[in-house]
Amino acid sequence: MLVVLMLAPVFAESTDKGNTSLMKAAQENFAPLPDKPVFKSDNPSLPAKLTLGKMLFFDTRLSKSNVFSCNSCHNLSTGGVDNNSFSTGHNWQAGGRNSPTVLNAALQVAQFWDGRAADVEAQAQGPILNPIEMAATQELVIARLKTIPEYVALFKQAYPNQKESLTYKNLADAIGAFERTLLTPSRFDEFLKGNERALNANEKAGLKLFMDKGCVNCHNGVTVGGNSFQKFGVMNTPGFLKDKGRFDLTKKEDDLNVFKVPTLRNVALTYPYFNDGSVWDLKEAVKVMAWTQLGDKLSDEEIGKILSFLNALTGKQPEVVMPILPPSTPATPKPSRG
């Protein structure tokens, strides 16, 4: 009994040192989410802009058919995605890439898998005009909104210093402002802030392995990914890879099969995985990434530990109340499937 009593404090001290070392390493590679949303500009009209952006995010009248909204592909009830390999768009066409999550997206280096939009405000302009997604035109969307008095008033409140407030740029700006509020703090953030008890032993073991194996080389920073571009297939090329990535945008050979590294926050919710949504099981996705990016074949035990850590990245989901949208008027342009 005496030996046990003497050894216990030594073991506890060793564990404490290990936790402190792990936390320090984590703090060097990651960062907690900000306590408040980071807006492009903070002014007295911001509340009106957020109200407007939220309404527009859910309004299907931004699509040609009046069927699809931003929330159709970035469903706030299911981790900011629609859990389909490819989202369904205008006339039931399928998109060419998996829809990334909108949660915490504003904190990433760029938007879309190829990074073609600089921020969420620029990103919001794309899908509305994409013929496969919402298939509208700027002229159609603005014409619809201008026939709805409530929207006209809201745009004036949100952009009071502009002579012409109801513009397509302002529409996207308001949607982007709303999206900046969609933060999902998790227990991992509490750990990064100094609470060693925020993660359990299995999650800490997974975090350590995640860093030791080199996953952290790409999946780092405040969004655990999303802040760099990387070739998919550094060590081994996955058999399902068909998309050429940023090459289609830049036409540079160095960008062949290069994609924006996806965020791993809420990754347990954002299946299926990869740019083509071809893998539905997170365990399989971890196995594929280890082999293609690191040339490592992980054991089931190692994968289990990493999964424990990844599950700890699921944060508190935004509690968004569906907005009551203003009705159309007889002058509002009608939906079209053509």
Image (cartoon, helix red, strand yellow):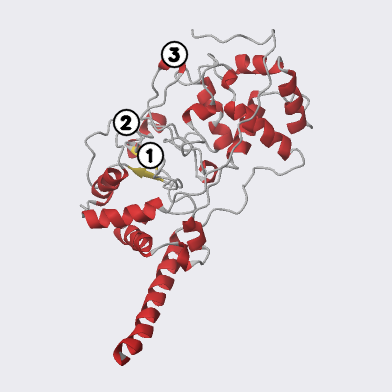
SS type, badge 2: loop
Q: Position of residue 39 (x, y in %)?
A: 64, 44
Pointer 2 and pointer 1: residues touching (CB < 8 Å)? Answer: yes
Crowdedness near tag 2: few (<14), some (14–19) or many (≥20) residues, C-alpha within 10 Å? some
Q: Is 128 located above or below residue 114 in the figure?
A: above
- Front in this rendered view, residue 324 or 45: 324
User: What amino acid does circle 3 point to?
Assistant: Asn
Q: Is 207 located above or below residue 102 in the figure?
A: below
- Which residue corresponds to the image point at 55% horizontal and 46% vertical from the top-left? 183
**First reached walking from the N terminus: tag 2 or tag 3:** 3
**First reached walking from the N terminus: tag 2 or tag 1:** 2
Residue 229 appears left or right of 212 = right
Q: Which residue is mark 2?
A: 243
SS type, badge 3: helix
- Front in this rendered view, residue 42 or 208: 208
User: What amino acid does circle 1 point to?
Assistant: Phe
The answer to whether any part of residue 204 appears in the image is yes
Q: Which residue is mark 3?
A: 91
Q: Which residue is mark 1?
A: 259
User: What amino acid does circle 2 point to?
Assistant: Asp
- Front in this rendered view, residue 158 or 122: 158
**First reached walking from the N terminus: tag 3 or tag 1:** 3
**Quadrant housing residue 211:** bottom left
SS type, badge 1: strand
- Which residue corresponds to the image point at 35% horizontal and 55% vertical from the top-left? 308
**Quadrant housing residue 267:** top left
Q: Position of residue 243 (x, y in %)?
A: 32, 31
Crowdedness near tag 3: few (<14), some (14–19) or many (≥20) residues, C-alpha within 10 Å? some
- Which residue corresponds to the image point at 60% horizontal and 54% vertical from the top-left? 35
Kindly give the residue lying farthest to the front in the view shown: 1
